[in-house]
Amino acid sequence: MSQFRDEQSSALNASRSEQKIAILGGGYAGLAAAIELNRLGYGDNVTLFDARLRHQKITQWHKLARGRQAHHYEVAFSHLAERFNFRFVHKAIDMKRVIADPAYELGGHFGAIVLAQGSHTPAKPPGVITLDQLRDDAHSQQLVHNLTNKSIAVIGGGPTGVQFAFEFAARGNSVDLYEARDRLLPTFDASLGITALKAAFAAGIRVHLLTEFLRYDNGNILCSTGGKEETRQTQHVLFVPGVKSTPAFTCDVFGRLEYQQGGKFYAAGDNSYIPGRGLNSKSAQAAVRKGQHVARTVFADLTGKQAQEYTYPELGYFVSLGPQNAVGYLLSQKTAFSGPVALFMKEAIEKQYNLYLEGLPVYP
């Protein structure tokens, strides 16, 4: 009888561990997965791991250059864990080690593991400020917060670089914006880049296209244009040339990693590619939707139900052009527009996410 009870208890514990879910990364995708699993009744089963203590609304981070403080754009994971019923573990996770031996790296057995560590910026050149540095270093945050009437070089003409450049210019700084490709916002239709370029000229931002950043040393920035090197003086350099996945995972249409045994691993956010009709851009809206989708797949797998394919369509995207303007599109990148309506849409998207973190079901 004792042996039977021991076997029954062991089977029950194994069943419970199979229901446990680990989410690695508390960015837009990882947090969305945790929120969605809580909505599905699995919040108590979720453990979220992150190397930071606070979730950061990184798409609003450019407002630091507007003079805002970082605490307006981050929320403690401890508060979110209480609100959405998950367990938070403050720990940096090595993706390769967790795939090789998940129980050892995570300190326990999990029936489902969601890889959601997103993207990282390239290696930091000497003397510059990076986005990762701004996220973690209070001194750098305060520096950017106080910059007025200075000369600033922004490296990178993607959404992050463009948004910071316009914020710096609006506060009376002298701004040079460098982009290695032939237009601003190069991952979007050319109409967005053209609109942003016109607005940059109007704001007094000097834009240098087809210009590669080489280094920054003793107040001098060295760049190369058409093979010709040029040196310019500047007091500060913000280095935001784009992001890379850490690492990149290819999934099936449900968000499960391909080429795995047992279906334990899933991926969401910038570090995932989900084939089919769903949106795969490196944007917050895609990350949130992927996180929700993968959470639903995990729930389906744990409950023996049929998972649904990822089909979230691209609805639009907006980039801030300073406190009074924005550029973006709805449904089609060919319909780019700027002005008060674009600014309203940009702010509405930010408010929507803020309400989401408060627990409102604003992402169906």
Image (cartoon, helix red, strand yellow):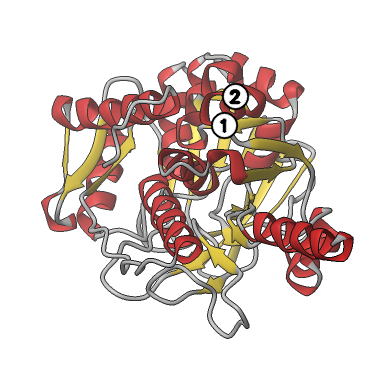
Q: Nearer the viewer, residue 72 or 263?
A: 263
* Residue 137 falls left or right of residue 105: left
Name the quadrant of the N terminus.
bottom right
Q: Residue furthest front?
A: 1
Q: Looking at the image, which residue is at 57% across and 27% down?
A: 80
Q: Which residue is mark 2?
A: 82
In the rendered image, is residue 25 in sight? yes
Q: Looking at the image, which residue is at 37% across and 74% down?
A: 253
**Marks 1 and 2 close (CB-CB < 8 Å):** yes
* Figure check: 316 above or below 322: below
The three-letter code of the residue at mark 2 reads Glu
C-alpha gap between disc 1 and disc 2: 5 Å
Secondary structure type for disc 1: loop
Q: Which residue is mark 1?
A: 85
Q: Position of residue 184 (x, y in %)?
A: 36, 52
* Residue 346 falls left or right of residue 178: left
Q: Position of residue 185 (x, y in %)?
A: 36, 53
* Residue 229 falls left or right of residue 109: left
In the rendered image, is residue 147 in sight? no
Q: Which mark is residue 115?
A: none
Q: Looking at the image, which residue is at 23% across and 27% down?
A: 343
Q: Looking at the image, which residue is at 66% across and 44% down?
A: 47
Quarter of image, res 262: bottom right
